[in-house]
Amino acid sequence: MLLCRSLTGYSYQRSNGNKKITGEQKGFAVVELFTSEGCSSCPPADELVAQISRETNNQPVYILAYHVDYWNRLGWKDVFSSADYSSRQDQYAGWLHLKSVYTPQIVVNGREELIGSQEQVLRKAISTSLDRQSDVQLRVAPMQVDKGQLHLQYTVSPAGGQTNLLVAVVQKAAQTQVRRGENSGRTLSHVQVVRKLSSYALDGKDTGAATIQLPAGIPVADLEIISFLQTPANGGIIAATKAAIPVF
């Protein structure tokens, strides 16, 4: 039995079975995990998305792990945490009409939320999303890295309309020895850690360019770009893609 502590109470969920995600893909799945090294309920969710990442490596499943900052007050400051990611989770609470936020929480394609350790619910949500035809195509091409800045170009077909392009700089793997707080003494492994998230209003444009400052101290080979189109009115994600960062 896994315990998930929210800001207003506790929830429980048992994980049963491990059926893999298979089948022909028509769509995509953006899996956004809200997690924290300061929460003892989060490591099982981190492990679950790592397993999903391994299984779906060649499929259009895009995992983004946001480390929120509101558990830092428990005695351990999560080095990957950001108030921006807490704010994004709050935004989802509004879009999905939730009374509170919690960790670990997963949102799939901006439309469905679940406790991050609910393996079968997550697998079903991913499979359903992969089977849903996508009518919008997004292409993002990283062009070059210059003085720590990534220059990229994007194309949307049909034109973007009232949507936002979000570009996440993702660290593919990380590990931390936690010395205080609820996970004190544990070595935690993470995948797909969001290190920077940038948003651009498309305003009906179908092409454009952007420049993103890459996080310092991380080899470019350890990073990748996950980009997606999100409707600001309701949070729905309508297209997604990923790309490697060019290494010269």
Image (cartoon, grey):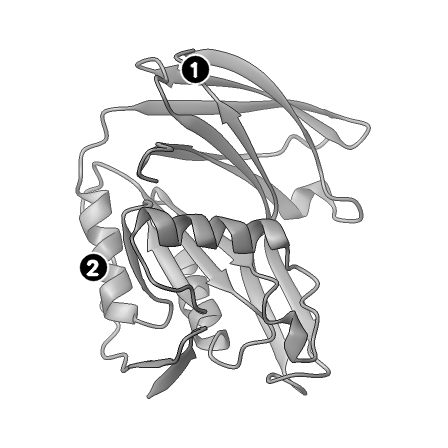
Which residue does the image show at 54% across and 77% down from the upper left?
39
Front in this rendered view, residue 214 or 114: 114
Residue 191 is at least partly visible in this image: yes
Q: Which residue is mark 1?
A: 203
Q: Circle 2 sits in a helix, a strand or a loop, which is it?
A: helix
Q: Which residue is mark 2?
A: 124
Quadrant of residue 13 within the rendered picture = bottom left
Few, some or many residues within 10 Å of mark 1 (<14, 14–19, 20+): few
On-image quarter of the C terminus: top right
Q: Earlier in the sequence, mark 1 or mark 2?
A: 2
In the image, which is nearer the foreground, mark 1 or mark 2?
A: 1
Vertical relation: 118 (above or below) 227: below
**Disc marking residue 111:** none
On-image quarter of the N terminus: bottom left
Amino acid type for the residue under numbered disc 2: Lys
Q: Using residue 65 as the reference point, say whether residue 4 is left or right of it.
A: left
**Rounded to the nearest whole Å, what is the CA distance between mark 1 and mark 2?**
34 Å
